[in-house]
Image (tube, rainbow, N blue to C red):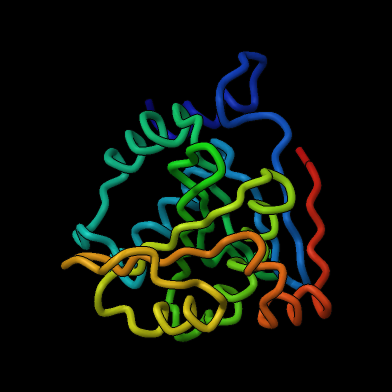
């Protein structure tokens, strides 16, 4: 099924996953919009950017066919994840997600293109998705899996209240943020005092 076909379905009368009202999360100049089928190409451009692929376990180039299968078979069929496109003043710069949601726990993930140039966007997105997870979904634990070698992400997580959840392996560091520590931690308190997070719905 092509991207054009997916978009036509989303704009037509046939209900399909990934259409209809979506969650919007806003703070300052940043917006997180819940993934919809019409975002398929935007998501492809982010996932396939060399700076994003370099942080994946498989850093090889992603084909559009493989991406479309990923959208159809993983995103649209998933019932245990939330995926958002991150945009700054209307320019798409990354994704934020919660996945593998079980009971009160989920894995958090933030990916932005050219991370050295979008540190602020990554910072905002992490704050916003945490707020959504704890305030709106009622989660109590967020797991962050930081790839080995990504020292800046590891340092940011630790500075933001995440603690070591279990020993690292050859692939990841495993970090944990619990809801009580989130609300009490000065990094999060300072952000939300300056940048109130607004969560709503839009078509």
Identify the residue at image location x=65%, y=68%: 182
The number of numbered discs placed on residues in the rendered structure image is 0
Left or right: where does residue 136 sit relative to residue 157? right
Q: In x, y percent, where is residue 61?
A: 23, 58
Q: In x, y percent, where is residue 134?
A: 67, 53
The residue lying toward the viewer, choosing from 33 and 165, is: 165
Identify the residue at image location x=64%, y=20%: 12
Identify the residue at image location x=63%, y=64%: 87
* Location of residue 159 with respect to 61 vertically, above or below: below
* Location of residue 111 with respect to 22 vertically, above or below: below
* Location of residue 151 with respect to 71 vertically, above or below: below
Q: In x, y percent, where is residue 74?
A: 38, 34
State which quarter of the image contains the C terminus: top right
Q: In x, y percent, where is residue 94?
A: 51, 63
Left or right: where does residue 86 sit relative to residue 101? right
> Which residue reaches farthest top?
14
The residue lying toward the viewer, choosing from 182 and 23, is: 182
State which quarter of the image contains the N terminus: top left
Identify the residue at image location x=54%, y=36%: 37
* Location of residue 19 with respect to 175 vertically, above or below: above
């Amino acid at each position: 099924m092509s991207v054009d076909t997916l978009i036509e379905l989303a704009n037509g009368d046939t209900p399909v996953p990934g259409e209809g009202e979506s969650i919007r999360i806003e703070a300052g100049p940043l917006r997180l919009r819940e993934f919809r089928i019409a975002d398929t190409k935007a998501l492809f451009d982010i996932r396939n950017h060399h700076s994003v692929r370099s942080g994946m376990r498989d850093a090889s180039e992603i084909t559009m066919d493989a991406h479309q299968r990923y959208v159809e078979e993983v995103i649209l069929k998933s019932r245990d994840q939330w995926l958002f496109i991150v945009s700054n003043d209307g320019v798409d710069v990354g994704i934020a997600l919660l996945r593998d949601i079980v009971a009160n726990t989920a894995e958090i993930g933030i990916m932005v293109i050219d991370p050295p140039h979008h540190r602020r966007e990554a910072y905002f997105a992490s704050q916003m998705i945490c707020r959504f997870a704890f305030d709106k979904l009622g989660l109590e634990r967020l797991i962050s899996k930081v790839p080995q070698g990504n020292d800046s992400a590891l340092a940011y997580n630790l500075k933001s209240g995440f603690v070591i959840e279990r020993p690292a392996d050859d692939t990841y560091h495993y970090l944990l943020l619990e809801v009580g520590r989130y609300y009490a931690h000065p990094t999060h308190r300072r952000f939300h005092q300056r940048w109130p997070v607004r969560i709503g719905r839009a078509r």
